[in-house]
Amino acid sequence: MRAIDLLIIMAYLAAVVAAGAWFGRRQKTTSRYFLAGGNVPWWAIAASIVATETSTITFISVPGIAFSRGGDFRFLQLVFGYLAGRVVICLLFIPSYFRGDLVTVYELLQDRFGNRVKALAASLFITVRTIGDGIRLLLTAIVLGAVYGAFHAGAHVSAAIQMSVLLIGIVMIIFTFFGGMEAVVWIEVVQLGIYIVGAVAAAIVLATKIPGGVPAAIAIGEQFHKFRTFDFALDLTRSYTFWSGLIGGCFLTMSTHGTDQYLVQRYLCTSSPRRAATALLASGAVILAQFIGFLFMGVLLFAFYGPNAPFAAGDQVFPDFITHHMPSGLSGLVVAAIFAAAMSSSLNSVAATFVADLYAPAVRGRDDRHYLKVSHVVTVFAGIAQIAVALAMHNQQRSALDAALSVASLINGPILGVFLLETLRRGSSTSALIGMSAGLAVVLSVWVFTPVAWPWYAVIGSLTTVSVGGAVNRVIPSGVPNDKPALL
């Protein structure tokens, strides 16, 4: 690493801040701040979804999965579930997003179940998103810490990671604070191009450094069974089998892409359900190709370092290659690409959820400028909370990808369950609350007391919520008054 690499990295961060300020000129209403005016083209939304779903965790952890001892392509079974979940969302959920002027997806729960259920779902989303994006922020900071350590021999890497968390978090807060959702989407379009170029550049350099090139890497991968893709064992304790991938991945995607404000807010930035569905399906094709590419990157890394490489976790291998083996200039480009993945900010979605679903129902009758100011304040505090999570999880050894997906699976399942109750037109406020409580209790018990793998958490949580909520509804009749407050 040389000065030019750090210059590229800092120039990228400065450009992100500048873009946020540029988009900030148009953020005069909550509608513009949260929904970008509702006229973003579908291809930009598709790119934004891919950028959101990829993240630094994918950039670093997925190659680590294929690289690690016993690692292979079985992670792709989960991606097949991601694709199936997208189809279900297009058929089941997306049409309902455009049947009114929604700010958040949780407002769909208002008419059917009342404010209490909506508030619980919104609160769970804020919790999950804060933890998940704190992990994303940490992993990006680990990469920057490795860069700093390579540039300054003998540097205290742990301190560099903590400083990196603060730097990246502050940049994320600033550009989201000013630019709103419009800045987030369009910056993600640019980011997608940056980290695809960065990943391809890294793969080319890596292939040239392997004796014998790509054919030799493929031969080594085959020797160590790195290309094994399917595992049809019906074993609930294993994360990457065909059944856990297809079923668990489908339910996880239905929850993250169908009931999570972070993704649904992007659909609401388009003008019709058809455009939203097109964007979601197109993103699925790109995601499949992207995961195949990142897993193959892991095989290349395995061929380069060998089976006895001294890494405590697979997450460490790609950052090591970037900082120690990439040519000057390209190394800075790849790190900038990793930052690009990290800058997919959820702060605007958290602010939208807090203001529309929690604050506005409690503080009614204010003008739109008041709610816009509150949104700015929440953006700052949400960013601080994510920074705090990243710093708190600094010393954990678990794969960041597993940690993030486990958190999402635990909490999003019960939220998906209550949306399924709404779609099926079953349940009252009381039955939905009881169903969600039961779903949370069961899935948390499974997590604590059983060896069941995390892809099944969303399945268990959602089906428990639907079953218990439906059963309670037979005893307690539905019917909830509409007390939805006006925000926009």
Image: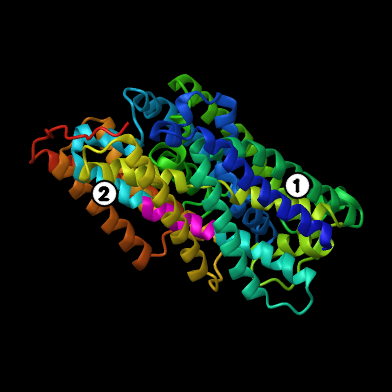
Furthest-right residue in this view = 212
The kind of residue on which mark 1 rests is Gly
Q: Does the magenta stretch include residue 435?
A: no
Judge whether 153 appears above or below 109 on screen. Answer: below
- Mark 2 or mark 1, which is nearer the start of the sequence? 2
Q: Where is residue 326 drawn, in percent x and y? A: 83, 58
Q: Where is residue 341 drawn, in percent x and y? A: 62, 48
Is 353 or 116 nearer to us in this picture?
353
Q: Where is residue 18 drawn, in percent x and y? A: 63, 44
Is 17 or 216 nearer to us in this picture?
17
* Identity of the residue drawn at 52% across and 47% down: 345
> What is the distance, in whole Å, between disc 1 and disc 2 at their CAs?
40 Å
* Identity of the residue drawn at 67% across and 43% down: 292
Badge 2 marks a residue whose secondary structure is helix
Is 369 or 19 nearer to us in this picture?
369
In this figure, which residue is indicated by the disc labeled 1?
198
In this figure, which residue is indicated by the disc labeled 2?
120
The part of the image, by quadrant, that contains residue 221 is bottom right
Judge whether 172 appears above or below 246 on screen. Answer: below
Task: Categorize mark 1 by other alpha carbons within 10 Å: few (<14), some (14-19), many (20+).
Answer: many
The kind of residue on which mark 2 rests is Leu
Magenta region's main secondary structure? helix
Marks counted in the figure total 2
Residue 228 seen: no
Question: Start and end of the magenta stretch?
Answer: 126-136
